[in-house]
């Protein structure tokens, strides 16, 4: 009879344990319907992750990515090869901030989604889940672009070796319907220090010092296509600002004339921000168009 008497207490204790454990468990997630979904985020939760559909991917087009025609041509050709099922490279977009690296990837999705291109964005801290992400899209008939924005690592980061293996090397081969596009403000994705060079003459460092340095640049080498973006000059900055003024005003049925006064304001905007980039030009256009609409 004693076990029967203890049963209610045991049930109550199990209920309390479940109440504490349940918040740690991942919430049930619906599989992404890639027929109607063009982009998804890999969301890490507790001890696992899942794909979360992105409803609004923005309307930026390839025509909106200005001042980087050479870079755009290279990336577009590589993407066309991939979408058509031809050999294509993983791509590393590096260089100055605000020059259109991330915008170009978004524009590629809008350009090629009708041809089966889909984008999965993953944070660099979640790259250790690459195998889980690959498993989540196994058997899908679409072409997946795995996108990691603002990529850089410390040597001890978990995602470093996972990405390195997925790009090129080891027994594992990435699926035929997956490529990796990454953006970074730095070409070498792991920091290099003056001490790395000083270590060559330091008796306390590793014997094979050159191999230590090679390890730090080997990840970048595994991207088949490197595309560098450079700071823009003032005329290009002004051209981008004019483009976005027209683009943002058009849906509201207004026109904003480009005047000397507006040009001075646009230059001053960049000076106050301490940077002259496509992003800065876009932000100025949003501010100015919004002000004009507010006074109407």
Image (tube, rainbow, N blue to C red):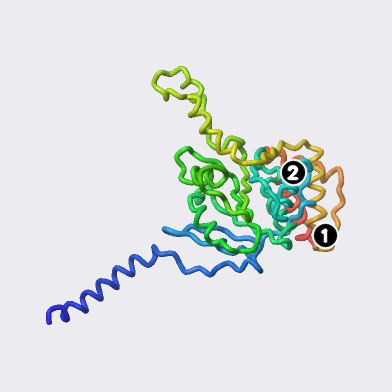
Given this view, does label 1 or label 2 mark the residue nearer the observer? 2
Q: Depth check: give the residue in front, 135 or 183.
A: 135
Asked if residue 270 lies left or right of residue 144, the reply is right
Rendered residue at 75%/40% (across/down)? 268
Q: Quadrant of residue 189?
A: top right
**Mark 2: few, some, or many residues within 10 Å (few <14, many ≥20)?**
some
Label 1: element kind: helix
The answer, for residue 41, to whether it is visible in the render is yes
Q: Residue 256's spot in the image, x, y percent? A: 85, 54
Q: Work out whether 77 lies above or below 115.
A: above
Residue for badge 1: 250
Percent across and percent down for residue 183 are 63, 44
Q: In this view, does 238 lie above or below 49?
A: above
Instruction: Answer left or right for 172 relative to 93.
Output: left
- Residue under label 2, please give it: 74
**Quarter of the figure that contains the N terminus:** bottom left
User: N-terminal of the two: label 1 or label 2?
Assistant: 2
218 or 249, nearer to the observer: 218
């Amino acid at each position: 009879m004693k076990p029967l008497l203890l049963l209610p207490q045991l049930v109550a204790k199990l209920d309390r344990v479940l109440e504490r454990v349940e918040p740690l468990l991942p919430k049930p997630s619906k599989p992404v319907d890639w027929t109607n979904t063009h982009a998804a985020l890999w969301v890490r939760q507790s001890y696992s992750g899942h794909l979360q559909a992105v409803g609004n991917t923005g309307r930026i087009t390839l025509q909106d990515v200005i001042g980087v025609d050479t870079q755009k041509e290279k990336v577009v050709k590589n993407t066309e090869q991939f979408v058509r099922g031809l050999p294509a490279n993983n791509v590393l977009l590096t260089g100055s901030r605000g020059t259109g690296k991330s915008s170009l990837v978004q524009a590629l999705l809008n350009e090629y989604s009708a041809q089966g291109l889909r984008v999965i964005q993953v944070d660099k801290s979640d790259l250790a889940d690459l195998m889980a992400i690959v498993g989540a899209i196994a058997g899908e008939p679409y072409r997946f672009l795995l996108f990691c924005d603002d990529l850089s690592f410390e040597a001890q980061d978990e995602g470093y070796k996972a990405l390195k293996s997925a790009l090129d090397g080891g027994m594992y081969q990435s699926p035929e319907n997956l490529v990796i596009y990454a953006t970074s403000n730095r070409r070498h994705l792991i920091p290099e220090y003056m001490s790395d060079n000083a270590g060559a003459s330091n008796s306390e460092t590793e014997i094979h010092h050159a191999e230590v340095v090679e390890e730090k640049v080997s990840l970048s080498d595994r991207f088949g296509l490197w595309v560098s973006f450079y700071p823009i000059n003032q005329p290009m900055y002004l051209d981008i600002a004019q483009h976005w003024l027209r683009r943002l005003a058009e849906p509201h049925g207004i026109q904003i004339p480009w005047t000397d006064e507006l040009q001075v304001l646009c230059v001053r905007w960049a000076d106050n921000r301490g940077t002259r980039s496509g992003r800065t030009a876009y932000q100025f256009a949003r501010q100015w168009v919004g002000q004009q609409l507010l006074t109407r």
